Structures are given as structure tokens and as C-alpha cells.
Image (cartoon, rainbow, N blue to C red):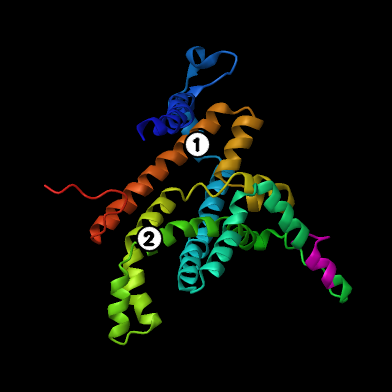
């Protein structure tokens, strides 16, 4: 088992931990041809310029706004799907439902956006149907005002089924005798769910919620950059796309690194705060509080 872990550990070291050393360019006036060693030191100036940049502040606000949509409307869906699957009596129907729900997770965002374009685009199935009935087409894919709804719908379709796996595993760990005892006492399906299922899932729900809060500034890169031109930067610009266009496209390597580093630090603080809050309510959170 330890040998099987070696490839994963090497992957984390090479692609996650080793690149952390490159964050030093956030404190430099980095020039690629000079390298890290010979680039001039800039101190905190990149961060000062970053937080006085209206484009960065707009991307930050957009990220928080879209993350709030995802947290409110996307997070509960896998839980609801898991409860539905768990309530299905037929094992065959349960497996078919699970397979259909899992499948979109393995599709790339390019294919997902293309499928939504075929259904909701200006020349898509729905708008062509509306035109056949003499109705005006609806700009589902190009309307900046409804873009948050579109983004959440795409994420639900793609990833809700995959996220459901964790809740199904947690449901399988709940003692069946609790349901049998509750049913013998006359508790109906809703009471069993409220008093047994949801309390049994509470540690997992809190754990996933903490991780989601810590990752709240990462609302998705591919999904937004693929639709940025359609709805405009005003609606689809988030921290990840801002970092890409500032650092890679615009050549502002130090500014892009500063934006990425600031995002990582804020995410770390959010995880710590959410975990501390979980401890206040008597939950373990990501890790249990040390008992002295």
C-alpha cells in the first residue's frame, strides 16, 4: 500500500508543493530573461498595485458573487441526489440512476459548453423550437444578467452526480438498526430522515462545507474562460481568468503571481476560520481539536 502511494506523493510534490517556491516572483519585478536570481526585488509593491487595480477588485467581487451562487444552489444538490438514490428500492434502477448522474463528470468543460450551446445557444434546439412557434429567441448563453444561473446549472449537470458519491458512502455507514427501531416505533420516512439520516450525515456535510469555503475563490477557470467572450469580461472575469490574462497573456508575471498568492492566503484563512467555527459547535471539522 505504501508503494502504491508513491506516484501520488511524487505528483503532489512536483506539481503542487515544488511550484510554491516560485511565489517569490510576487515580491520581484520579474523578468523571464533575467530569471528569479537576477530580477529586481520589489517588496510589497506588487500587492499595493494589485489592490488598487479596479480590474482586480472587479474580478474579486465577481468571484465572491459567483461563489455565493454556487455555495447556495450547488452544494445541497449532491445531498438531495444521494437521499433520492438511497430511497430507491430497486438496485437496478439505483445503478442506472447513479451511472447517468456520474457520466457528465468525465466530460471536459469544452464538451459541456458545446452541449449547452447546442441546447441553449442562439441556433440551439430550444431557440429553434421557439422560432417555429413564432416566438423570439432567448439569449441563454450570451446574457450577462443570467450568467450566474447558467454557470450553476452547468456545474450541477456536470459535477453534482460525482459529488453524490461521498454522501452515498456516508449513508452506507449509518447503522440500519436505527431505521428499524424508528420504524418499529412508528416513525415515518420523513421523521427517519430528519432524526437519523441527516444527523448521521452532519459530520460529512460540515467537512465538505469547510473545504468548499476554503476553495470559494476557485470558482473554475476553463468554464469561465470558454464563455468569457460570449458574455463579456464584466460578467465572466474571475480571479483565475484575471491571473491568466494579467500574468500569462499580458506579461505581468509578478502581478499574476501576487494575485495567485493573495488568493491562496485568503483561502487558507477561510479554511482555518471555518474549521475553528466547527470546533465551536462541537464538530471535528477537517481535524479534531487536540485534547489536553
Instruction: Give the distance between the C-alpha atoms of the residues marked 2 and 1, in whole angstroms.
Output: 34 Å
Specify the principal SS of the magenta part. helix
Mark 2 Cα within 10 Å, few/some/many (few <14, many 20+)? Answer: some
Relative image position of residue 276 (x, y in whole percent)? 27, 52
Q: Nearer the viewer, residue 37 or 27?
A: 37
Q: To which residue does mark 2 refer?
A: 170
* Secondary structure category for the residue under label 2: helix
| Residue at position x 48%, y 61% in the image | 75
Query: Is-magenta flag for residue 129?
Result: yes
Left or right side of 60 for 201: left
As drawn, 206 above or below 261: below
- Give me the residue at 81% from left, 67% from top: 127
**Magenta region includes residue 195:** no
Bounds of the magenta span? 120-130
The location of residue 47, given as percent across then percent down, is 47, 34
Side of 4 where 81 appears, left or right: right
Residue 205 lies in what quarter of the image?
bottom left
Mark closer to the observer (2, 1): 2
Percent of width and height locating residue 221: 59, 44
Q: Are marks 2 and 1 in contact (CB under 8 Å)?
A: no
Image height check: is 71 above or below 21? below
Which residue is labeled 1 in the image?
A: 260
On screen, 246 above or below 272? Answer: above
Amino acid at each position: 500500500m505504501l508503494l502504491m502511494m508513491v506516484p501520488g506523493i511524487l505528483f503532489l510534490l512536483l506539481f503542487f508543493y515544488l511550484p510554491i517556491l516560485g511565489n517569490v516572483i510576487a515580491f520581484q519585478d520579474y523578468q523571464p530573461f533575467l530569471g528569479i536570481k537576477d530580477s529586481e526585488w520589489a517588496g510589497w509593491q506588487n500587492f499595493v498595485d494589485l489592490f488598487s487595480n479596479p480590474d482586480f477588485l472587479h474580478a474579486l467581487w465577481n468571484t465572491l458573487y459567483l461563489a455565493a451562487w454556487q455555495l447556495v444552489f450547488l452544494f445541497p444538490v449532491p445531498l438531495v441526489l444521494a437521499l433520492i438514490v438511497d430511497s430507491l428500492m430497486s438496485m437496478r434502477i439505483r445503478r442506472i440512476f447513479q451511472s447517468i448522474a456520474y457520466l457528465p463528470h468525465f466530460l471536459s468543460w469544452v464538451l459541456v459548453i458545446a452541449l449547452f450551446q447546442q441546447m441553449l445557444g442562439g441556433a440551439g434546439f430550444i431557440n429553434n423550437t421557439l422560432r417555429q412557434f413564432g416566438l423570439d429567441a432567448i439569449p441563454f448563453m450570451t446574457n450577462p444578467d443570467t450568467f450566474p444561473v447558467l454557470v450553476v446549472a452547468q456545474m450541477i449537470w456536470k459535477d453534482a452526480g460525482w459529488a453524490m458519491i461521498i454522501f452515498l458512502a456516508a449513508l452506507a455507514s449509518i447503522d440500519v438498526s436505527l431505521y428499524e427501531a424508528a420504524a418499529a416505533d412508528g416513525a415515518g420516512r420523513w421523521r427517519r430522515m430528519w432524526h437519523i439520516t441527516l444527523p448521521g450525515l452532519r459530520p460529512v456535510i460540515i467537512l465538505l462545507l469547510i473545504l468548499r469555503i476554503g476553495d470559494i475563490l476557485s470558482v473554475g477557470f476553463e468554464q469561465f474562460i470558454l464563455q468569457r467572450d460570449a458574455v463579456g469580461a464584466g460578467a465572466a472575469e474571475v480571479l483565475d481568468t484575471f491571473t491568466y490574462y494579467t500574468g500569462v497573456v499580458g506579461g505581468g508575471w509578478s502581478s499574476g503571481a501576487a494575485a495567485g498568492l493573495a488568493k491562496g492566503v485568503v483561502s487558507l484563512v477561510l479554511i482555518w476560520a471555518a474549521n475553528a467555527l466547527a470546533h465551536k459547535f462541537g464538530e471535528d471539522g477537517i481535524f479534531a481539536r487536540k485534547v489536553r
